[in-house]
Image: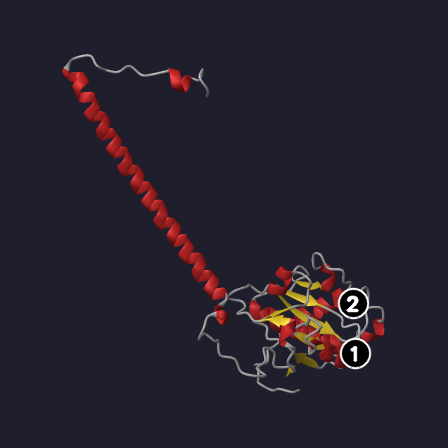
């Protein structure tokens, strides 16, 4: 603190007075100092061990999430394997989704409803195009047919929101948001059975908090499924389907 600072001017008494009590103080002080160092060493050492343990847990968790990037590690998969027995498999381009191990690495807690703004065939074609950079897990046609293009354990680039991509299963519906006639009875019923099946597999509550439209995803600029989507009708169909027997997945493939 400069020439006038107290750290340079104040000094403790030298303690040079005679007497046995004066001679014992330095030894006591040294003992206290040694004890203090010992305790500090233990605390520091314990903290280091705890920190190392935390790092190990984080590292293990990251490896678990990125298991497919570890050399020699590959989770077995069967081409054309379905999560939903009522679907036909048509693979999306690998550029339109991300390999994952859901729900182990990301919990699945949303079903996201989309409308294609086009035909069934055009949606399939677009999702097979690597330049599109987006796709959903399923497409439902106006006639009720269902194709699965991405496994539910993988992350589809569908919502325009990373968290919702990682936690959601996306379903496209053939048609246009401004054409109510595109939303057919067959499509509603087929989609409801699919959604009920997804909810059962992942323990997703059958309610509007967990079954949402693309428009409800934070940060999105999309409006689907649009103003003509009948949510009351759809949710009632999903609830009914949820109480019906669930088909067992099979491995039929096409395309």
Q: Closer to the camera, 162 or 133?
A: 133
Relative horizontal placement of residue 168, taking residue 228 as reference (left or right): left
* Quarter assignment of residue 81: bottom right
Disc sitting over residue 229 in the figure: 2
Where is residue 76? Give x, y as percent.
Answer: 49, 79
Quick one: which residue is furthest to the top in this view? 17
Image point 53% across, 67% down: which residue?
103
Which residue, given by chain and number where applicable, does mark 1 sit on? 119
SS assignment at label 1: loop
Give the secondary structure at mark 2. Answer: loop
Rendering coords of residue 121 (x, y %): 75, 81
**Which sits in the foreground, 43 or 211?**
43
Q: Which of marks 1 and 2 is nearer the N terminus?
A: 1
- Which residue lies at the image location 59% right of the left edge and 72% below the top edge? 152
Q: What numbered label is drawn on residue 99?
A: none
Query: Quarter holding the C terminus?
Result: bottom right
- Left or right, 45 with respect to 66, comes to left
Tell me the CA gap for discs 1 and 2.
17 Å
């Amino acid at each position: 603190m400069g020439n006038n600072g107290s750290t340079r001017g104040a000094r403790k008494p030298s303690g040079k007075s005679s007497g046995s009590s004066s001679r014992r103080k330095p030894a006591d002080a040294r003992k206290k100092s040694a004890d203090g160092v010992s305790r500090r060493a233990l605390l520091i050492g314990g903290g280091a061990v705890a920190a190392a343990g935390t790092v190990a847990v984080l590292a293990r968790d990251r490896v678990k999430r990125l298991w497919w990037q570890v050399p020699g590690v590959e989770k077995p998969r069967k081409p054309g394997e379905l999560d939903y027995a009522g679907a036909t498999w048509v693979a999306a381009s690998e550029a339109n989704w991300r390999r994952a191990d859901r729900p182990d690495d990301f919990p699945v807690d949303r079903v996201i409803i989309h409308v294609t703004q086009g035909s069934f065939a055009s949606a399939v074609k677009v999702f097979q195009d690597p330049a599109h950079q987006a796709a959903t897990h399923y497409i439902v046609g106006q006639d009720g047919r269902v194709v699965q293009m991405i496994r539910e354990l993988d992350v589809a680039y569908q919502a325009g929101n990373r968290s919702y991509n990682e936690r959601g299963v996306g379903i496209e519906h053939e048609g246009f948001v401004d054409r109510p006639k595109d939303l057919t009875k067959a499509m509603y019923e087929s989609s409801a059975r699919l959604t009920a099946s997804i909810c059962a597999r992942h323990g997703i509550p059958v309610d509007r908090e967990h079954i949402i439209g693309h428009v409800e995803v934070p940060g999105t600029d999309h409006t689907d499924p649009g103003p003509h989507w009948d949510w009351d009708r759809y949710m009632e169909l999903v609830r009914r389907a949820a109480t019906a027997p669930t088909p067992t997945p099979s491995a039929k493939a096409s395309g």
